[in-house]
Amino acid sequence: MRVIQIIAGLLLLIQASVASAVLDIEIIGAGEKQIPVAIVPMGGDAKLSQTIHEVVVGDLMRSGLFRMVDLAGKFLTEPSQVSYADWQVRGADGLAIGNVTVLPSGRIEARFRLFDVVKQSELIAQAVSAHDGQARAIGHRIADLIYEKMTGDKGVFGSRIAYVNRRGQNFRLIVADSDGYNEQVVLAQNEPIMSPSWSPDGSHLAYVSFETGHAVVFVQSLYTNQRKVLADFRGSNSAPAWSPDGKQMAIVLTRDGSSQIYLVRPDGSNLRRITFSGAIDTEPHFSPDGQSLLFTSDRGGSAQIYRMPVEGGPEQRMTFGEGANYSPRHSPDGSGFVFAHRNNGKFYIALQDFQTGQMELLTEGGWEKKPSFAPNGKLVLFASEARGRGILATVSSDGRVKQHMFTQSGDAREPVWGPNP
Amino acid sequence: MKKLVISLVLVNLLAACASNKPAETTAAPVDSGAKATTPAPKTAIAPVTPVAGDPLNDPASILAKRSVYYPFDVDAVQDADKPVVQAHGKYLASNPNRKVRLEGNCDERGSNEYNLGLGQRRADGVKKMLELGGAKSGQMESVSYGEEKPVASGHEEASWSQNRRTDIKYAK
Protein backbone atom coordinates (compact mmCIF):
# COMPACT_ATOMS: atom_id res chain seq x y z
CA MET A 1 0.00 0.00 0.00
CA ARG A 2 2.74 2.38 0.95
CA VAL A 3 4.59 1.58 -2.28
CA ILE A 4 1.49 2.44 -4.28
CA GLN A 5 1.21 5.75 -2.50
CA ILE A 6 4.82 6.57 -3.28
CA ILE A 7 4.37 5.69 -6.95
CA ALA A 8 1.24 7.82 -7.11
CA GLY A 9 3.21 10.64 -5.54
CA LEU A 10 5.98 10.31 -8.12
CA LEU A 11 3.47 10.37 -10.94
CA LEU A 12 2.05 13.61 -9.58
CA LEU A 13 5.52 15.12 -9.49
CA ILE A 14 6.22 14.09 -13.07
CA GLN A 15 2.96 15.58 -14.22
CA ALA A 16 3.71 18.82 -12.44
CA SER A 17 7.11 19.18 -14.09
CA VAL A 18 5.95 18.27 -17.59
CA ALA A 19 2.83 20.36 -17.66
CA SER A 20 4.14 23.72 -16.60
CA ALA A 21 3.81 25.93 -19.64
CA VAL A 22 0.95 27.87 -21.12
CA LEU A 23 0.32 26.37 -24.53
CA ASP A 24 -1.44 29.13 -26.30
CA ILE A 25 -2.88 32.61 -25.88
CA GLU A 26 -5.48 33.96 -28.28
CA ILE A 27 -6.34 37.66 -28.37
CA ILE A 28 -9.66 38.77 -29.81
CA GLY A 29 -10.50 42.42 -30.52
CA ALA A 30 -8.56 45.60 -29.88
CA GLY A 31 -8.80 48.69 -27.71
CA GLU A 32 -10.48 51.81 -29.02
CA LYS A 33 -7.11 53.51 -29.18
CA GLN A 34 -3.90 51.54 -29.47
CA ILE A 35 -0.68 53.24 -28.49
CA PRO A 36 2.12 52.50 -30.99
CA VAL A 37 5.32 51.56 -29.18
CA ALA A 38 8.73 50.33 -30.32
CA ILE A 39 10.20 47.78 -27.89
CA VAL A 40 13.84 47.16 -28.79
CA PRO A 41 15.29 43.90 -27.41
CA MET A 42 17.82 44.71 -24.71
CA GLY A 43 21.55 44.48 -25.12
CA GLY A 44 23.71 42.28 -22.91
CA ASP A 45 22.83 38.68 -22.10
CA ALA A 46 21.07 37.44 -25.25
CA LYS A 47 19.00 34.72 -23.63
CA LEU A 48 17.72 36.92 -20.81
CA SER A 49 17.07 39.71 -23.29
CA GLN A 50 14.92 37.41 -25.41
CA THR A 51 12.84 36.22 -22.45
CA ILE A 52 12.30 39.76 -21.19
CA HIS A 53 11.36 40.98 -24.66
CA GLU A 54 8.81 38.20 -25.10
CA VAL A 55 7.23 38.96 -21.74
CA VAL A 56 7.08 42.74 -22.27
CA VAL A 57 5.60 42.46 -25.77
CA GLY A 58 3.21 39.69 -24.69
CA ASP A 59 1.92 41.68 -21.71
CA LEU A 60 1.40 44.89 -23.69
CA MET A 61 -0.30 43.10 -26.59
CA ARG A 62 -2.66 41.20 -24.28
CA SER A 63 -3.85 44.46 -22.76
CA GLY A 64 -5.23 45.38 -26.19
CA LEU A 65 -4.05 48.96 -25.64
CA PHE A 66 -0.74 48.77 -27.51
CA ARG A 67 0.45 48.18 -31.05
CA MET A 68 4.02 47.06 -31.73
CA VAL A 69 5.92 49.26 -34.18
CA ASP A 70 8.16 47.40 -36.66
CA LEU A 71 11.79 47.89 -35.63
CA ALA A 72 12.99 47.51 -39.25
CA GLY A 73 16.19 45.92 -38.06
CA LYS A 74 17.13 48.81 -35.78
CA PHE A 75 19.05 47.84 -32.66
CA LEU A 76 20.10 50.36 -30.02
CA THR A 77 20.78 50.25 -26.31
CA GLU A 78 21.98 53.75 -25.32
CA PRO A 79 20.15 57.09 -25.17
CA SER A 80 22.86 58.61 -27.37
CA GLN A 81 21.74 56.30 -30.19
CA VAL A 82 18.12 57.50 -30.11
CA SER A 83 17.05 59.44 -33.18
CA TYR A 84 13.53 60.73 -32.46
CA ALA A 85 12.97 61.59 -36.12
CA ASP A 86 13.57 57.93 -37.13
CA TRP A 87 10.91 56.70 -34.73
CA GLN A 88 8.46 59.47 -35.55
CA VAL A 89 8.60 58.37 -39.19
CA ARG A 90 7.77 54.83 -38.09
CA GLY A 91 4.79 56.14 -36.15
CA ALA A 92 5.97 55.21 -32.67
CA ASP A 93 4.74 57.18 -29.67
CA GLY A 94 6.98 55.32 -27.24
CA LEU A 95 10.43 53.74 -27.53
CA ALA A 96 11.93 51.32 -25.01
CA ILE A 97 15.62 50.32 -24.90
CA GLY A 98 18.00 48.88 -22.33
CA ASN A 99 20.65 46.43 -21.22
CA VAL A 100 20.44 43.28 -19.14
CA THR A 101 23.34 41.76 -17.23
CA VAL A 102 23.98 39.08 -14.67
CA LEU A 103 25.59 40.64 -11.60
CA PRO A 104 28.46 38.92 -9.74
CA SER A 105 25.92 38.00 -7.03
CA GLY A 106 23.93 36.05 -9.63
CA ARG A 107 21.08 38.56 -9.66
CA ILE A 108 19.75 39.77 -12.97
CA GLU A 109 19.75 43.51 -13.54
CA ALA A 110 17.98 45.28 -16.38
CA ARG A 111 18.64 48.97 -16.98
CA PHE A 112 15.69 50.20 -18.93
CA ARG A 113 14.69 53.50 -20.57
CA LEU A 114 11.42 54.67 -22.06
CA PHE A 115 11.22 57.68 -24.40
CA ASP A 116 8.28 59.80 -25.48
CA VAL A 117 8.99 60.00 -29.20
CA VAL A 118 6.43 62.77 -29.82
CA LYS A 119 7.64 65.04 -27.02
CA GLN A 120 11.25 63.94 -27.57
CA SER A 121 11.90 63.30 -23.90
CA GLU A 122 12.99 60.50 -21.62
CA LEU A 123 10.07 59.24 -19.52
CA ILE A 124 11.77 56.55 -17.44
CA ALA A 125 15.35 55.52 -16.68
CA GLN A 126 15.28 52.72 -14.17
CA ALA A 127 17.19 49.64 -13.07
CA VAL A 128 15.04 46.58 -12.33
CA SER A 129 16.66 43.57 -10.69
CA ALA A 130 15.49 40.13 -9.64
CA HIS A 131 16.78 36.81 -8.39
CA ASP A 132 18.51 34.46 -10.78
CA GLY A 133 15.89 32.72 -12.92
CA GLN A 134 13.31 35.46 -12.57
CA ALA A 135 13.75 37.13 -15.94
CA ARG A 136 10.00 36.91 -16.49
CA ALA A 137 9.40 38.95 -13.33
CA ILE A 138 11.67 41.66 -14.75
CA GLY A 139 9.69 41.59 -17.99
CA HIS A 140 6.40 42.00 -16.14
CA ARG A 141 7.82 44.90 -14.11
CA ILE A 142 9.03 46.70 -17.25
CA ALA A 143 5.68 46.10 -18.97
CA ASP A 144 3.95 47.59 -15.92
CA LEU A 145 6.21 50.68 -16.08
CA ILE A 146 5.50 51.20 -19.79
CA TYR A 147 1.76 50.61 -19.32
CA GLU A 148 1.59 53.06 -16.42
CA LYS A 149 3.48 55.84 -18.22
CA MET A 150 1.69 55.47 -21.52
CA THR A 151 -1.91 54.91 -20.28
CA GLY A 152 -1.96 56.68 -16.92
CA ASP A 153 -3.37 53.56 -15.22
CA LYS A 154 -1.49 51.23 -12.94
CA GLY A 155 -0.23 48.04 -14.58
CA VAL A 156 -1.19 44.57 -13.36
CA PHE A 157 1.32 42.38 -15.20
CA GLY A 158 3.36 41.81 -12.03
CA SER A 159 0.33 40.52 -10.13
CA ARG A 160 -0.58 36.88 -9.78
CA ILE A 161 -3.66 34.77 -10.31
CA ALA A 162 -4.94 31.62 -8.58
CA TYR A 163 -7.10 28.91 -10.10
CA VAL A 164 -7.95 25.24 -9.82
CA ASN A 165 -6.80 22.76 -12.46
CA ARG A 166 -8.91 19.60 -12.74
CA ARG A 167 -7.72 16.51 -14.58
CA GLY A 168 -10.09 13.60 -14.10
CA GLN A 169 -10.13 13.05 -10.35
CA ASN A 170 -6.97 15.10 -9.78
CA PHE A 171 -7.34 18.65 -8.50
CA ARG A 172 -4.50 21.16 -8.16
CA LEU A 173 -4.65 24.63 -6.65
CA ILE A 174 -2.31 26.78 -8.73
CA VAL A 175 -0.83 30.24 -8.38
CA ALA A 176 0.67 31.73 -11.56
CA ASP A 177 1.80 35.00 -13.11
CA SER A 178 -0.99 37.06 -14.66
CA ASP A 179 -0.06 35.59 -18.07
CA GLY A 180 -0.48 32.03 -16.78
CA TYR A 181 3.26 31.25 -16.70
CA ASN A 182 5.42 30.50 -13.67
CA GLU A 183 3.02 28.09 -12.04
CA GLN A 184 3.32 27.17 -8.42
CA VAL A 185 1.28 24.21 -7.17
CA VAL A 186 -0.18 25.14 -3.79
CA LEU A 187 -2.12 21.91 -3.23
CA ALA A 188 -2.58 18.70 -5.25
CA GLN A 189 -5.04 15.97 -4.32
CA ASN A 190 -7.72 13.63 -5.60
CA GLU A 191 -10.62 15.49 -3.98
CA PRO A 192 -12.17 18.76 -5.21
CA ILE A 193 -10.74 22.20 -4.42
CA MET A 194 -12.89 25.33 -4.79
CA SER A 195 -13.08 29.05 -4.26
CA PRO A 196 -9.50 30.27 -3.81
CA SER A 197 -9.42 33.73 -2.22
CA TRP A 198 -6.40 36.03 -1.86
CA SER A 199 -5.56 37.82 1.36
CA PRO A 200 -5.28 41.57 0.59
CA ASP A 201 -1.47 41.48 0.95
CA GLY A 202 -1.15 38.44 -1.34
CA SER A 203 0.58 36.37 1.35
CA HIS A 204 -2.20 33.82 1.93
CA LEU A 205 -4.85 31.91 0.03
CA ALA A 206 -8.07 30.76 1.63
CA TYR A 207 -9.86 27.96 -0.22
CA VAL A 208 -12.33 25.11 0.10
CA SER A 209 -11.00 21.55 0.11
CA PHE A 210 -12.96 18.29 0.22
CA GLU A 211 -9.98 16.20 1.35
CA THR A 212 -11.71 15.16 4.60
CA GLY A 213 -14.92 14.14 2.83
CA HIS A 214 -16.80 17.41 3.01
CA ALA A 215 -16.21 21.09 2.22
CA VAL A 216 -13.78 22.64 4.73
CA VAL A 217 -12.24 26.15 4.58
CA PHE A 218 -8.44 26.30 4.85
CA VAL A 219 -6.06 29.27 5.00
CA GLN A 220 -2.58 28.65 3.61
CA SER A 221 0.57 30.79 3.58
CA LEU A 222 2.11 31.07 0.12
CA TYR A 223 5.53 31.67 1.68
CA THR A 224 5.77 28.81 4.18
CA ASN A 225 2.99 26.60 2.74
CA GLN A 226 1.77 26.15 6.30
CA ARG A 227 -1.98 25.96 6.51
CA LYS A 228 -4.74 25.72 9.04
CA VAL A 229 -8.42 24.92 9.13
CA LEU A 230 -10.54 28.07 9.30
CA ALA A 231 -13.96 26.40 9.43
CA ASP A 232 -14.87 22.72 9.73
CA PHE A 233 -18.45 22.50 10.95
CA ARG A 234 -20.93 19.83 9.92
CA GLY A 235 -22.25 20.12 6.37
CA SER A 236 -20.46 22.54 4.05
CA ASN A 237 -17.94 25.28 4.92
CA SER A 238 -17.13 27.49 1.96
CA ALA A 239 -16.90 30.78 0.03
CA PRO A 240 -14.11 32.52 2.00
CA ALA A 241 -13.64 36.27 1.36
CA TRP A 242 -11.23 38.69 3.05
CA SER A 243 -12.05 42.18 4.25
CA PRO A 244 -9.85 44.86 2.59
CA ASP A 245 -7.87 45.36 5.83
CA GLY A 246 -7.36 41.59 6.17
CA LYS A 247 -8.72 41.61 9.71
CA GLN A 248 -11.85 39.62 9.10
CA MET A 249 -13.30 37.16 6.67
CA ALA A 250 -16.75 36.28 5.46
CA ILE A 251 -17.49 32.57 5.07
CA VAL A 252 -20.55 30.45 4.34
CA LEU A 253 -21.65 27.67 6.68
CA THR A 254 -24.55 25.22 6.66
CA ARG A 255 -24.15 24.23 10.31
CA ASP A 256 -27.41 25.99 11.23
CA GLY A 257 -29.39 24.84 8.17
CA SER A 258 -29.17 26.34 4.69
CA SER A 259 -26.05 28.19 3.45
CA GLN A 260 -25.74 31.42 5.46
CA ILE A 261 -23.01 34.07 5.71
CA TYR A 262 -20.84 34.43 8.80
CA LEU A 263 -17.97 36.71 9.77
CA VAL A 264 -14.85 35.32 11.40
CA ARG A 265 -11.34 36.52 12.13
CA PRO A 266 -8.60 34.89 10.03
CA ASP A 267 -7.46 33.03 13.17
CA GLY A 268 -10.91 31.43 13.47
CA SER A 269 -12.08 33.50 16.44
CA ASN A 270 -15.19 35.67 16.88
CA LEU A 271 -17.46 33.68 14.56
CA ARG A 272 -20.86 35.30 14.09
CA ARG A 273 -23.76 34.83 11.71
CA ILE A 274 -24.90 37.85 9.66
CA THR A 275 -27.62 36.53 7.31
CA PHE A 276 -30.83 34.88 8.53
CA SER A 277 -32.77 34.14 5.35
CA GLY A 278 -33.21 30.37 5.38
CA ALA A 279 -32.43 30.52 1.65
CA ILE A 280 -29.02 29.93 0.04
CA ASP A 281 -26.90 33.01 0.85
CA THR A 282 -23.39 32.61 -0.52
CA GLU A 283 -20.38 34.11 -2.36
CA PRO A 284 -19.92 37.15 -0.09
CA HIS A 285 -17.50 39.82 -1.37
CA PHE A 286 -16.38 42.90 0.58
CA SER A 287 -16.66 46.39 -0.91
CA PRO A 288 -13.29 48.21 -1.24
CA ASP A 289 -14.21 50.44 1.74
CA GLY A 290 -14.96 47.35 3.83
CA GLN A 291 -18.44 48.61 4.72
CA SER A 292 -20.72 46.35 2.71
CA LEU A 293 -20.97 42.91 1.17
CA LEU A 294 -22.34 41.74 -2.14
CA PHE A 295 -23.59 38.15 -2.16
CA THR A 296 -25.67 35.62 -4.11
CA SER A 297 -29.04 34.54 -2.72
CA ASP A 298 -32.03 32.58 -4.01
CA ARG A 299 -34.37 34.07 -1.41
CA GLY A 300 -36.45 35.64 -4.19
CA GLY A 301 -36.91 32.32 -6.01
CA SER A 302 -33.91 32.48 -8.34
CA ALA A 303 -30.25 33.24 -7.65
CA GLN A 304 -29.71 37.03 -7.65
CA ILE A 305 -27.17 39.53 -6.33
CA TYR A 306 -27.85 41.32 -3.04
CA ARG A 307 -26.01 43.92 -0.98
CA MET A 308 -25.92 44.37 2.80
CA PRO A 309 -23.92 46.27 5.44
CA VAL A 310 -21.07 44.11 6.78
CA GLU A 311 -22.30 44.23 10.35
CA GLY A 312 -25.77 43.10 9.31
CA GLY A 313 -28.83 45.17 8.49
CA PRO A 314 -31.11 45.85 5.56
CA GLU A 315 -30.42 43.73 2.50
CA GLN A 316 -31.03 45.16 -0.93
CA ARG A 317 -31.59 43.24 -4.15
CA MET A 318 -29.26 44.51 -6.91
CA THR A 319 -30.14 42.43 -9.98
CA PHE A 320 -33.52 42.01 -11.64
CA GLY A 321 -34.87 40.86 -14.95
CA GLU A 322 -34.68 37.54 -16.74
CA GLY A 323 -32.29 34.80 -15.77
CA ALA A 324 -30.17 34.26 -12.70
CA ASN A 325 -27.00 35.91 -11.42
CA TYR A 326 -24.05 34.61 -9.43
CA SER A 327 -20.54 35.33 -8.10
CA PRO A 328 -20.50 39.14 -7.56
CA ARG A 329 -17.15 40.98 -7.21
CA HIS A 330 -16.80 44.71 -6.57
CA SER A 331 -14.75 46.78 -8.98
CA PRO A 332 -11.60 48.12 -7.28
CA ASP A 333 -12.96 51.69 -7.42
CA GLY A 334 -16.22 50.57 -5.80
CA SER A 335 -18.40 51.98 -8.58
CA GLY A 336 -19.92 48.68 -9.65
CA PHE A 337 -19.55 44.92 -9.78
CA VAL A 338 -19.00 42.03 -12.16
CA PHE A 339 -20.94 38.79 -11.96
CA ALA A 340 -21.94 35.70 -13.91
CA HIS A 341 -25.29 36.09 -15.66
CA ARG A 342 -27.25 33.03 -16.78
CA ASN A 343 -30.00 33.39 -19.37
CA ASN A 344 -31.41 31.08 -22.06
CA GLY A 345 -28.92 28.33 -21.29
CA LYS A 346 -25.83 30.52 -21.56
CA PHE A 347 -23.53 32.08 -19.01
CA TYR A 348 -22.22 35.62 -19.61
CA ILE A 349 -19.82 37.88 -17.75
CA ALA A 350 -21.76 41.01 -16.84
CA LEU A 351 -20.96 44.37 -15.30
CA GLN A 352 -23.37 46.58 -13.36
CA ASP A 353 -22.93 50.15 -12.23
CA PHE A 354 -24.22 50.93 -8.71
CA GLN A 355 -25.52 54.34 -9.74
CA THR A 356 -27.39 53.49 -12.92
CA GLY A 357 -28.30 49.90 -12.00
CA GLN A 358 -27.73 49.04 -15.67
CA MET A 359 -26.38 45.61 -16.54
CA GLU A 360 -23.89 45.44 -19.40
CA LEU A 361 -22.80 42.11 -20.90
CA LEU A 362 -19.03 42.00 -21.41
CA THR A 363 -18.98 38.71 -23.30
CA GLU A 364 -21.01 37.02 -26.02
CA GLY A 365 -22.06 34.18 -23.78
CA GLY A 366 -21.17 30.54 -23.48
CA TRP A 367 -19.83 28.79 -20.47
CA GLU A 368 -18.42 31.83 -18.68
CA LYS A 369 -18.25 31.95 -14.89
CA LYS A 370 -16.49 33.30 -11.82
CA PRO A 371 -15.28 36.76 -12.86
CA SER A 372 -12.78 38.83 -10.86
CA PHE A 373 -11.22 42.22 -11.55
CA ALA A 374 -7.53 42.87 -12.06
CA PRO A 375 -6.23 45.20 -9.33
CA ASN A 376 -6.45 48.20 -11.71
CA GLY A 377 -10.05 47.44 -12.68
CA LYS A 378 -9.21 47.42 -16.40
CA LEU A 379 -9.43 43.66 -16.98
CA VAL A 380 -11.73 40.91 -15.76
CA LEU A 381 -10.47 37.33 -15.38
CA PHE A 382 -13.00 34.52 -15.67
CA ALA A 383 -13.44 30.81 -16.35
CA SER A 384 -14.52 29.98 -19.88
CA GLU A 385 -14.59 27.03 -22.20
CA ALA A 386 -13.01 26.47 -25.59
CA ARG A 387 -11.98 23.40 -27.58
CA GLY A 388 -13.92 21.32 -25.07
CA ARG A 389 -11.82 22.40 -22.10
CA GLY A 390 -12.18 24.73 -19.18
CA ILE A 391 -9.81 27.66 -19.80
CA LEU A 392 -8.83 31.00 -18.30
CA ALA A 393 -10.01 34.09 -20.12
CA THR A 394 -9.93 37.83 -19.68
CA VAL A 395 -12.00 40.64 -21.06
CA SER A 396 -11.24 44.35 -20.81
CA SER A 397 -13.77 46.14 -18.61
CA ASP A 398 -15.08 47.95 -21.72
CA GLY A 399 -15.69 44.55 -23.34
CA ARG A 400 -13.49 45.33 -26.36
CA VAL A 401 -10.52 43.01 -25.89
CA LYS A 402 -10.74 39.34 -24.97
CA GLN A 403 -8.07 36.74 -24.54
CA HIS A 404 -8.16 33.00 -24.06
CA MET A 405 -5.34 31.40 -22.11
CA PHE A 406 -4.93 27.70 -22.75
CA THR A 407 -3.02 26.40 -19.76
CA GLN A 408 -1.71 22.84 -19.50
CA SER A 409 -4.02 19.89 -19.88
CA GLY A 410 -7.23 19.53 -17.94
CA ASP A 411 -9.80 22.13 -17.00
CA ALA A 412 -9.00 25.51 -15.47
CA ARG A 413 -11.69 26.46 -12.94
CA GLU A 414 -12.40 29.03 -10.26
CA PRO A 415 -9.85 31.68 -11.27
CA VAL A 416 -9.30 34.73 -9.11
CA TRP A 417 -7.00 37.68 -9.71
CA GLY A 418 -4.66 38.48 -6.83
CA PRO A 419 -3.56 41.87 -5.48
CA ASN A 420 -0.65 43.87 -6.91
CA PRO A 421 2.69 42.94 -5.29
CA MET B 1 10.29 11.76 -20.58
CA LYS B 2 10.01 11.54 -24.34
CA LYS B 3 10.85 7.84 -24.15
CA LEU B 4 8.12 7.30 -21.59
CA VAL B 5 5.59 9.09 -23.77
CA ILE B 6 6.58 7.04 -26.81
CA SER B 7 6.34 3.78 -24.90
CA LEU B 8 2.93 4.72 -23.55
CA VAL B 9 1.77 5.57 -27.06
CA LEU B 10 3.10 2.20 -28.24
CA VAL B 11 1.30 0.40 -25.44
CA ASN B 12 -1.91 2.13 -26.39
CA LEU B 13 -1.41 1.43 -30.09
CA LEU B 14 -0.69 -2.24 -29.45
CA ALA B 15 -3.68 -2.45 -27.19
CA ALA B 16 -5.86 -0.83 -29.80
CA CYS B 17 -4.68 -3.30 -32.44
CA ALA B 18 -4.99 -6.31 -30.20
CA SER B 19 -8.65 -6.14 -29.38
CA ASN B 20 -11.92 -4.35 -29.77
CA LYS B 21 -12.24 -3.73 -26.07
CA PRO B 22 -12.71 -0.15 -24.90
CA ALA B 23 -9.40 1.64 -24.41
CA GLU B 24 -9.94 2.04 -20.66
CA THR B 25 -9.67 -1.67 -20.00
CA THR B 26 -6.30 -1.96 -21.74
CA ALA B 27 -4.54 0.93 -20.03
CA ALA B 28 -1.30 -0.12 -18.37
CA PRO B 29 -1.42 0.08 -14.58
CA VAL B 30 1.34 2.69 -14.51
CA ASP B 31 -0.82 4.93 -16.65
CA SER B 32 -3.74 5.10 -14.26
CA GLY B 33 -2.48 8.02 -12.20
CA ALA B 34 -1.81 10.22 -15.19
CA LYS B 35 -4.92 9.55 -17.17
CA ALA B 36 -8.01 11.70 -16.96
CA THR B 37 -10.61 8.98 -16.86
CA THR B 38 -14.31 9.59 -16.65
CA PRO B 39 -15.80 8.48 -13.35
CA ALA B 40 -16.69 4.80 -13.29
CA PRO B 41 -20.41 4.15 -13.64
CA LYS B 42 -22.07 3.80 -10.28
CA THR B 43 -22.66 0.24 -9.21
CA ALA B 44 -26.20 -0.58 -8.25
CA ILE B 45 -25.22 -1.64 -4.74
CA ALA B 46 -22.43 -0.14 -2.69
CA PRO B 47 -20.37 -2.77 -0.87
CA VAL B 48 -21.50 -3.27 2.70
CA THR B 49 -20.62 -5.85 5.30
CA PRO B 50 -22.73 -8.88 4.47
CA VAL B 51 -25.31 -9.77 7.09
CA ALA B 52 -27.44 -12.88 6.68
CA GLY B 53 -30.86 -11.93 5.40
CA ASP B 54 -30.02 -8.23 5.24
CA PRO B 55 -32.45 -6.69 2.73
CA LEU B 56 -29.73 -4.16 1.94
CA ASN B 57 -27.96 -6.88 -0.03
CA ASP B 58 -31.02 -7.92 -1.97
CA PRO B 59 -30.78 -6.49 -5.48
CA ALA B 60 -34.54 -6.88 -5.85
CA SER B 61 -35.26 -4.77 -2.76
CA ILE B 62 -36.23 -1.12 -3.06
CA LEU B 63 -33.18 -0.55 -0.82
CA ALA B 64 -31.01 -1.36 -3.83
CA LYS B 65 -31.93 2.10 -5.05
CA ARG B 66 -29.48 4.49 -3.43
CA SER B 67 -29.93 7.66 -5.46
CA VAL B 68 -32.70 10.21 -5.80
CA TYR B 69 -32.92 12.72 -8.65
CA TYR B 70 -34.13 16.30 -9.01
CA PRO B 71 -35.33 18.84 -11.54
CA PHE B 72 -33.04 21.84 -12.15
CA ASP B 73 -32.50 24.13 -9.15
CA VAL B 74 -34.88 22.09 -6.96
CA ASP B 75 -33.94 20.56 -3.62
CA ALA B 76 -37.17 18.81 -2.56
CA VAL B 77 -37.33 15.01 -2.86
CA GLN B 78 -39.64 14.25 -5.79
CA ASP B 79 -42.78 12.14 -5.35
CA ALA B 80 -41.37 9.34 -7.48
CA ASP B 81 -38.37 8.98 -5.15
CA LYS B 82 -40.21 9.26 -1.83
CA PRO B 83 -40.83 5.50 -1.47
CA VAL B 84 -37.07 4.91 -1.85
CA VAL B 85 -36.17 7.41 0.87
CA GLN B 86 -38.95 6.15 3.14
CA ALA B 87 -37.72 2.57 2.76
CA HIS B 88 -34.19 3.61 3.76
CA GLY B 89 -35.63 5.53 6.73
CA LYS B 90 -37.46 2.43 7.89
CA TYR B 91 -34.38 0.28 7.40
CA LEU B 92 -32.19 2.68 9.40
CA ALA B 93 -34.79 2.81 12.15
CA SER B 94 -34.70 -0.96 12.52
CA ASN B 95 -30.92 -1.16 12.07
CA PRO B 96 -29.64 1.49 14.48
CA ASN B 97 -26.03 0.39 13.98
CA ARG B 98 -26.13 1.28 10.31
CA LYS B 99 -24.81 4.66 9.25
CA VAL B 100 -25.30 6.57 6.02
CA ARG B 101 -23.65 9.45 4.26
CA LEU B 102 -25.96 11.58 2.15
CA GLU B 103 -24.09 13.22 -0.69
CA GLY B 104 -25.86 16.02 -2.54
CA ASN B 105 -24.79 16.80 -6.12
CA CYS B 106 -25.79 19.31 -8.78
CA ASP B 107 -25.48 19.88 -12.48
CA GLU B 108 -22.98 22.50 -13.62
CA ARG B 109 -25.48 25.30 -14.19
CA GLY B 110 -25.02 27.90 -11.47
CA SER B 111 -21.87 28.95 -9.69
CA ASN B 112 -19.80 26.32 -7.90
CA GLU B 113 -20.59 27.92 -4.55
CA TYR B 114 -24.32 28.24 -5.23
CA ASN B 115 -24.36 24.60 -6.26
CA LEU B 116 -22.52 23.61 -3.10
CA GLY B 117 -25.37 25.21 -1.15
CA LEU B 118 -28.00 23.57 -3.36
CA GLY B 119 -26.38 20.13 -3.00
CA GLN B 120 -26.33 20.57 0.76
CA ARG B 121 -30.06 21.38 0.75
CA ARG B 122 -30.70 18.26 -1.34
CA ALA B 123 -28.75 16.07 1.09
CA ASP B 124 -30.38 17.74 4.10
CA GLY B 125 -33.82 17.20 2.55
CA VAL B 126 -33.17 13.47 2.25
CA LYS B 127 -31.84 13.46 5.80
CA LYS B 128 -35.04 15.06 7.11
CA MET B 129 -37.16 12.51 5.29
CA LEU B 130 -35.07 9.65 6.68
CA GLU B 131 -35.57 11.10 10.15
CA LEU B 132 -39.32 11.20 9.59
CA GLY B 133 -39.06 7.51 8.74
CA GLY B 134 -37.46 6.83 12.11
CA ALA B 135 -33.71 7.16 11.44
CA LYS B 136 -31.74 8.90 14.20
CA SER B 137 -29.69 11.96 13.26
CA GLY B 138 -26.57 10.27 14.70
CA GLN B 139 -26.86 7.64 11.97
CA MET B 140 -26.60 10.20 9.19
CA GLU B 141 -24.16 12.72 7.81
CA SER B 142 -25.19 15.05 5.01
CA VAL B 143 -22.59 16.63 2.77
CA SER B 144 -22.52 18.37 -0.61
CA TYR B 145 -20.20 18.09 -3.57
CA GLY B 146 -22.04 20.78 -5.49
CA GLU B 147 -21.04 20.45 -9.16
CA GLU B 148 -17.55 19.17 -8.31
CA LYS B 149 -18.14 15.44 -8.81
CA PRO B 150 -20.28 14.93 -11.91
CA VAL B 151 -20.94 11.32 -12.96
CA ALA B 152 -21.66 12.52 -16.50
CA SER B 153 -19.59 15.27 -18.08
CA GLY B 154 -21.69 16.47 -21.03
CA HIS B 155 -23.18 19.95 -21.35
CA GLU B 156 -26.70 18.69 -21.99
CA GLU B 157 -29.76 17.55 -20.10
CA ALA B 158 -28.90 13.84 -20.47
CA SER B 159 -25.77 14.45 -18.36
CA TRP B 160 -27.23 17.11 -16.12
CA SER B 161 -30.18 14.93 -15.06
CA GLN B 162 -27.77 12.26 -13.80
CA ASN B 163 -25.75 14.83 -11.85
CA ARG B 164 -28.72 16.36 -9.98
CA ARG B 165 -28.73 13.71 -7.35
CA THR B 166 -28.46 12.73 -3.72
CA ASP B 167 -26.63 9.46 -3.08
CA ILE B 168 -27.44 7.43 0.01
CA LYS B 169 -24.16 5.74 0.90
CA TYR B 170 -24.02 3.16 3.65
CA ALA B 171 -20.86 2.96 5.74
CA LYS B 172 -18.99 -0.31 5.33
Image (cartoon, rainbow, N blue to C red):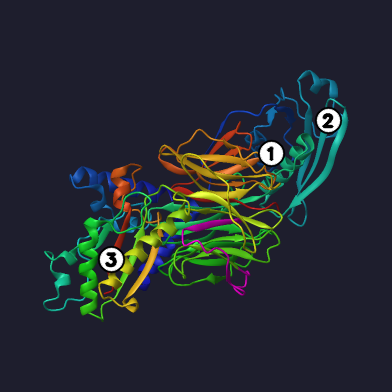
For image coordinates 87% across by 27% down, the residue present is A119
Image position, residue B102 (x, y; %): 33, 66
Label 3 resides on the chain identified as B
- Return the residue at label 2: A116
Please indicate whether residue B161 sits to the left or right of residue A217 in the image: left
Farthest residue toward the bottom? B97
Q: Secondary structure at mark 3?
A: strand
The reply to whether residue A336 is visible in this rendering is yes
Amino acid at the residue labelled 1: Val
- Asked if A234 appears above or below A162 in the picture, the reply is below
Density class for disc 2 (Cα within 10 Å; few <14, some 14-19, many ≥20) is some
Amino acid at the residue labelled 3: Ile
- Asked if B33 appears above or below A56 in the picture, the reply is below
Label 2 resides on the chain identified as A
Front-most of B13 and A306? A306
First in residue order: circle 2 vs circle 1:
1
> Would you say residue B14 sits in the magenta stretch?
no
Instruction: Tell me the mark number nearer the camera, choosing from 3 and 1.
Output: 3
For image coordinates 79% across by 18% down, the residue present is A89
- Asked if A97 appears above or below B61 in the picture, the reply is above
Q: Which residues are magenta?
A: A264-285
Front-most of A192 and A222? A192
- Return the residue at label 1: A56
Instruction: Tell me the mark number nearer the camera, choosing from 3 and 2.
Output: 3
Q: Secondary structure at mark 2?
A: strand
- Return the residue at label 3: B168
